[in-house]
Amino acid sequence: MPVPSYRSVGQIAVRLGLVTEAQIAEAVERQKTETSLGRTTLLGQLLLAAGYLTEDGLRRVLTAQKQAQAEFEKQGFSRIGVGDAFRMLGAIDDALRHYRAVLEEYGDCLAITAAARQRIAEIERDRKA
């Protein structure tokens, strides 16, 4: 079995075809609820309790996660690999470009608004004159 990249239990379970993304999303929402109530519940426990994952399936996921982590550490990486780091940097760059575009558009809107206010003031002055 190929070693999946070091990821969360949910991502590995989906990649192994043991659960669906919808089931993961439901379990994550349940996990958020549990956390808001001050309870710590692991995603694997929630998937098991919901019947989405069997004990054998959970063992497979945890084994795959452990193998992937060991592989990354063997290669000299800790939590993420170089490829993941570059993808993250690319996503950050994309977000910054989008943010800059939004700010430029917002600035253009402010300039148009200021010009419109100035023109309205001129028209009102002309009417009074």
Image: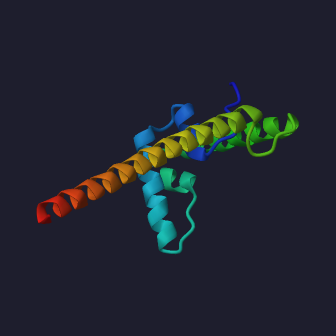
Q: Total label count?
A: 0
Q: Position of residue 79 (x, y in %)?
A: 75, 45
Q: Position of residue 19 (x, y in %)?
A: 47, 38
Look at 55% across and 54% down and name the residue there.
43
Q: Where is residue 125 in the image (x, y as percent from the top left)?
A: 19, 63
Does the image show residue 99?
yes
Q: In which quarter of the image is the C terminus?
A: bottom left
Q: Nearer the viewer, residue 83 or 120?
A: 120
Q: In which quarter of the image is the N terminus?
A: top right
Look at 45% across and 39% down and name the residue there.
21
Q: In which quarter of the image is residue 121?
A: bottom left
3 sits to left or right of 30? right
Can you name the residue that lies furthest to the front here?
129
Can you name the residue that lies furthest to the left here?
127
Look at 63% across and 35% down and name the residue there.
90
Does the image show residue 50?
no
Q: Which of 114 and 17 is in front in this view?
A: 114
Q: Where is residue 47 in the image (x, y as percent from the top left)?
A: 49, 50
Q: Which of 52 and 94 is in front in this view?
A: 94
2 sits to left or right of 33? right
Quick check: 26 above or below 125? above
127 sits to left or right of 20? left
Q: Quadrant of residue 8?
A: top right
Can you name the residue that lies furthest to the bottom here?
38
- Tell me how the rendering is colored: rainbow
98 sits to left or right of 127? right
